[in-house]
């Protein structure tokens, strides 16, 4: 091992922005807490996120493991984008280096 010193990695500004924004919004939302809103947030986390990211982005776009009607494909990809999966246009274009969505 000629160079065992780890190299510094560049910041992903887009990810840092979204993570910061989510935390700021969470702090602002504290005074507006209700159990119904918590249920809505959990629905988004436990239902919409897996549909958009796991099914839409990962299985449909990255692996092309199933086909779906256009309306369903567009719905799943839109949910994935709104949940924070990023732009879908680059998924599945480079088979030798697929994006890591795991």
Image (cartoon, rainbow, N blue to C red):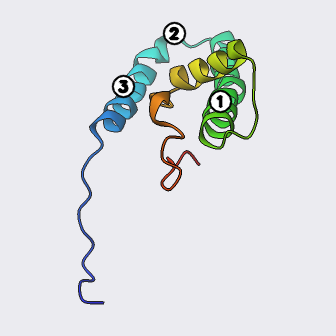
Q: What residue is disc 3 on?
A: 21
What residue is drawn where x is 48% and y is 18%?
30
Element assignment for label 2: helix
Element assignment for label 3: helix
Callout 3: few (<14), some (14-19), or many (20+) C-alpha neighbours within 10 Å? few
Tags 3 and 1 touching, CB below 8 Å: no
What residue is drawn where x is 62% and y is 11%?
34
Callout 1: few (<14), some (14-19), or many (20+) C-alpha neighbours within 10 Å? many
- Residue 2, percent from left and from top: 24, 89
Q: Is residue 30 left or right of residue 46?
A: left
What residue is drawn where x is 32% and y is 37%?
16
Front label number (2 vs 1): 1
Which mark is on residue 40? Answer: none
Front label number (3 vs 2): 3
Which mark is on residue 56? Answer: 1
What residue is drawn where x is 50% and y is 29%?
88
């Amino acid at each position: 091992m000629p160079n065992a010193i780890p190299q510094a990695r560049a910041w992903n500004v887009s990810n840092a922005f979204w993570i910061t924004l989510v935390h700021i919004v969470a702090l602002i939302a504290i005074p507006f807490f209700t159990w119904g809103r918590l249920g809505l947030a959990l629905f988004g986390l436990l239902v919409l996120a897996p549909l958009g990211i796991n099914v839409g982005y990962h299985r449909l776009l990255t692996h092309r493991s199933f086909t779906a009607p256009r309306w369903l494909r567009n719905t799943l990809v839109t949910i994935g984008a709104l949940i924070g999966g990023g732009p879908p246009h680059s998924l599945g274009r480079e088979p030798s280096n697929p994006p890591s969505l795991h």
